[in-house]
Amino acid sequence: MPRRTRRLAAHPPNATDRGGTVTRVDLRYGAATHVGLVRTDNEDAHLAAPPVFVVADGMGGHDHGAVASGFVIEEFTQLAAVGIQDATVGRAAADVMEAVHGRIDDYDAAHRAAGDLFFSAGTTAVAALLVADVAEPYWLVANLGDSRGYRFAAGELVQVTVDHSLVQELVDAGTIAAADAPGHPDSHIITRALGGPVHHDPDLFRLPAEESGRMLLCSDGVSGMLADDDIARILGDHPDPATAAEQVVAAAVAAGGRDNATAVVVDVMGLTRERPHVTDVQQPSTEQKAGAHP
């Protein structure tokens, strides 16, 4: 994907925050994906449609995983078209995940009715939603599975999401060291995802949309092949987000490419707070001034 630039107003037109200013967010973003060196099909999918950014990693073999991850992209594309608001963003993210799960249920049921009794598709999903209808814009990050969201700023890479995996549970329990997790034989076992008999709500994380902050969303074909230090070095070496995404994926492939590898990189280039012209400020109506109600 070529580099894209987008400016988002942090308030609806003619609206102001308590300080009488309007905040605008400048974004640049890019994405890359690769089938890897082992698999024949790419079951990853991604979306970069401000204010919504998504990576999904399908499971199920053949084209079934690609269908499941495609459901994620289709549903989040609809959310991007409708828009997101501070008051409802968490519920909106959960509703999108639930809609995907319902579509996978229907997809599985159709295949089982056709005679494939053990058919089962699924997908992970990680999404970063920029909430811009507030005085201080922020990211709402939602995830199910082991596709990850990272924050990179001031040379430091921080994992925002927590993997829903057996290995992560072993790390949390102190059974294995975090350093031993990437090569663990059970690293492929996911404990929560979209698809299957149990419908899980996503984990939700909120973090400020700081100027010069960079978000990375990636499938485990990236995080499972590269150490955090390697990812941080690549992100630090490439200011352009499209190039950074391409280089992260290329490094994962060069490290062995045992899985599909996908990365979406989003930069907050600027937060501009401007005092609007007096004619741009929405004035209260006569009824509002008088305290009247319909």
Image (cartoon, helix red, strand yellow):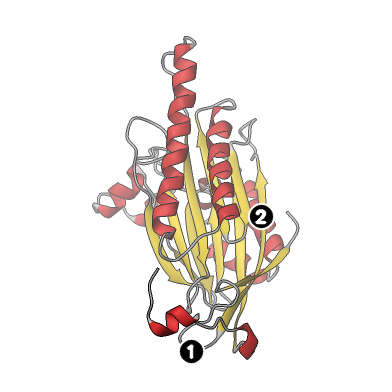
Closest to the observer, 176 or 79: 79
Residue displayed at 34% across by 30% down: 197
Q: Is residue 219 above or below residue 286?
A: above
254 or 104: nearer the viewer? 104
Q: Amino acid at mark 2?
A: Ala
**Residue 161 shows up from this direction:** no
Position of residue 98 measured from the top left corner of the image (x, y, whole percent): 41, 41
- Across and down, in percent, residue 39 comes to 61, 32
Using the image, determine if residue 92 lies above or below residue 272. Answer: above
For the residues carrying marks 2 and 1, which lies nearer the camera in this image? 1
* 126 on left or right of 22: left
Kindly identify the residue that appears in the image at 66 percent across and 55 percent down. Answer: 31
- Residue carrying label 2: 31
| Mark 2 crowdedness (10 Å alpha carbons): few <14, some 14-19, many ≥20 | many
The mark total stands at 2
Cα gap from disc 2 to disc 1, whole angstroms: 36 Å
Q: Which residue is mark 1?
A: 19
- In the rendered view, tell whether residue 244 sits above or below residue 66: below
- Quadrant of the rendered image containing residue 4: bottom right
Tell me what residue is drawn at x 62 percent, y 90 percent.
278
Please state which of residues 19 and 232 is positioned toward the viewer in this rendering: 19
Amino acid on which the number 1 mark rests in the picture: Gly
Q: Quadrant of residue 287?
A: bottom left
Compare marks 2 and 1 and give the one earlier in the sequence: 1
Which circle marks residue 153 in the picture? none
Residue 238: x %, y % from top left: 68, 68
Q: Residues within 10 Å of mark 1 (few under 14, many from 20)?
A: few
Q: Quadrant of the C terminus?
A: bottom left
The answer, for residue 93, to whether it is visible in the render is: yes
